[in-house]
Amino acid sequence: MHRDRSCHSGLACYNDPMPVTIGRLRESDLDEVMRIEQECFRFPWKRQFFLADLNRPESLCLGAGADGRLLGYAIVWRTGDELHLANIAVAPEVRHQGVGAELLRVVIDHGRELQAKRIYLEVRLGNSIAQQFYRKFGFFQTYTRREYYPDKEDALVLEREL
Ligand SMILES: CC(C)(COP(=O)(O)OP(=O)(O)OC[C@H]1O[C@@H](n2cnc3c(N)ncnc32)[C@H](O)[C@@H]1OP(=O)(O)O)[C@@H](O)C(=O)NCCC(=O)NCCS
């Protein structure tokens, strides 16, 4: 994240009343990323997964911040003419205040700039809040990946056109 709140990434900056600034993640953000990741997921990504994405040209790693603090992040992979939303999370104490929506809006804008055709993701069958979040943004279910997660829970595959 850019602590001065300016965006140097070439992506649009979005502000809401918090205000939240969206910018590219940096390696120096990873301690905060890992704290949020471990609070959000039963099987959190390892630090080196994020590090690898920071160095991969086809990955977009976004952070949402306010007052010098990281509030959430999104990791997106470009695969051909599709975007795969590989990870998105918002710190529990600032959820349902629009942070995730700002991240997703920037991801969608980025996909359009790249002229990608669609964006897709996997979400746990039992993660109804995330499903509501995605459906608000026009995602719809295309199929189910049986026993996709390490604990054998199914994943719904959701997608939307860009
Ligand atoms: C899913 C997640 C990223 C959403 O981020 P967020 O900042 O809390 O979401 P927003 O405040 O931008 O909400 C946008 C919309 O999502 C839905 N939503 C978000 N939180 C919700 C809740 N607690 N209950 C019901 N709907 C909710 C609503 O439709 C909301 O629109 P509204 O504000 O008009 O009601 C966040 O809940 C999160 O980090 N969850 C844990 C990690 C996770 O599950 N990631 C997704 C893995 S696939």
Image (tube, rainbow, N blue to C red):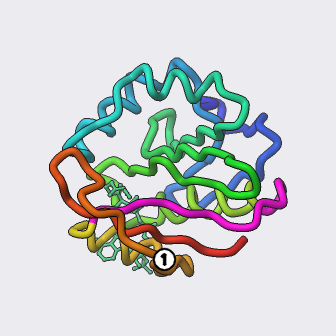
56 versus 82 height, above or below: above
Q: Which residue is drawn at 28% across and 37% down?
A: 44
Number of numbered discs present? Answer: 1
Q: On the image, numbered disc 1 is attached to which residue?
A: 142
Residue 90 versus residue 158: which sits nearer the camera?
158
82 versus 65 height, above or below: below
Q: Residue at x 38, y 29 (%)?
A: 32
User: In the image, 28: left or right of 57?
Assistant: left
Q: Is mark 1 within 8 Å of ligand 1?
A: no
Q: Which element type, helix, strand or loop, lies under badge 1?
A: strand
Q: Which residue is drawn at 26% across and 63% down?
A: 154
What span is colored magenta in the figure? Answer: 112-124
Q: Say whether residue 113 is magenta.
A: yes
Name the spot of residue 147 as percent of width and height, x first: 24, 57
Quadrant of residue 118 in the image? bottom right
Kind of residue indicated by mark 1? Thr
Mark 1: few, some, or many residues within 10 Å (few <14, many ≥20)?
few
Name the spot of residue 125 as percent of width and height, x first: 26, 69
Q: Say whether residue 118 is magenta.
A: yes
Name the spot of residue 129 as percent of width and height, x first: 30, 71
User: In the image, 92: left or right of 116?
Assistant: left
Position of the N terminus by quadrant:
top right
